[in-house]
Amino acid sequence: MLSVAGGIGGRPVGVDGGFTRRQFLFAAGAGLGVVVAAGLGAAELVDHGVLPGKSVLDRLDGACSVSVPPLHFASVGPTISGQFQSQARQTTVGYSIAYPPGHAPGDALPLIVMLHGFGGNHRSAFAGMQPAQGLALEVDAEPLTPMAMATVDGGGGYWNPHPGDDPMAMVVDELVPMCQGMGLGNPPKGIATMGISMGGYGAILFAERYPHMFSAVAAISPAIWTTYSEARQANAGAYASAADFAACDAVTHAGALAGIPVRVASGDADPFHRGVVAFAQGSPPSVHVVLTTGCHTGDFFTAQEVPSMVFLSQHLGT
């Protein structure tokens, strides 16, 4: 489902049926999606440091102005951290598991696997708050469904498999079974994926590859390219080859998400916005894409974490 929202802090305009796909495409061509019309390559390259200027201009002209609503938390639950030797990544990885208010290790809970962005690690996966705070959010004075959240070190090569370093297999074959051994994400309680930027792409990709493991997805500003050439120019380490890109192309494989509740949010001045639009156009009805004002910035990430957590709270079973 495509939605065009007028602002994160206020009431969305056109959400849940306000725009059909045809109406959205017409509006984008008329200037609603400036990044879409302006051409993807340059927009992505400037925000990745290959060409200068766009991010500065966006901030000057107000394209990045996003209000973060006041955040309200219940008493924050505990967080445990540790390490394990990953055969899939061929290195030692760190992880953290956060628990919701009133819960502790040993409790049976639904699980969110939160994937960090480029240059991050398990300690920096969330924006503007800690994972335990995200689980303790109160929205309209109501708590979220009790859920646990796991974060883990995925490296800097994106969350798709690479020769000698497979963060996807690390999550699916090592992290998730470890969490299930702790009582997290075992049926009938669900497992969701969530992420920001590189992690948002990973969250979508994981559900496309493993639709029977992941029952809900929330992706914020996902780093989606539409061609291997664009990806290679912006980040040569993202994919090992054109064949690897094709195998892990979130746009091409969007149909695999049929029946899975998915929420994706992207700002109209985000360098990956065109990729998100392409993903939305080919997505099944269970995918809800919010296209709104904003850039690839911390304020946008934090503001979108709140509705993303509410979305997962509604779709993970207790």
Image (cartoon, rainbow, N blue to C red):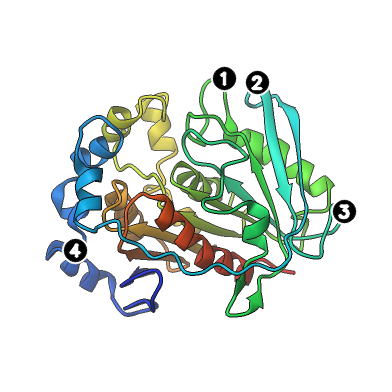
The span from disc 2 to disc 1 (Cα, nearest Å) is: 7 Å
User: Where's the N terminus, which quadrant?
Assistant: bottom left
Residue identified by numbered label 3: 106
Q: Earlier in the sequence, mark 3 or mark 1?
A: 3
Count of all numbered marks drawn on residues in the image: 4
| Residue 89 x/y as whole percent | 62, 25
> How busy is the neighbourhood of tag 3: few (under 14 within 10 Å), some, or many (20 plus)?
few
Query: Where 205 falls versus 167 (above or below)?
Result: below
Amino acid type of the residue tagged 4 in the rendering:
Ala
SS label for mark 3: loop
Q: Which residue is mark 2?
A: 90
Which x, y percent locates residue 178? 78, 41
In the rendering, which numbered label is found on residue 28? 4
Q: Residue furthest right?
A: 106
State the separation of the CA atoms marked 3 and 4. 49 Å
Pointer 1 residue: 164
Task: Mark 3 or mark 4: name the one nearer the start of the chain.
Answer: 4
- Please tell me whether mark 4 sits on a helix, a strand or a loop: helix
Query: Of 131 and 106, which appears nearest the observer?
Result: 131
What kind of residue is marked 3? Answer: Gly
Cα–Cα gap, marks 3 and 2: 29 Å
Look at the numbered discs 2 and 1 and tell me whether their residues touch, using CB distance below 8 Å.
yes
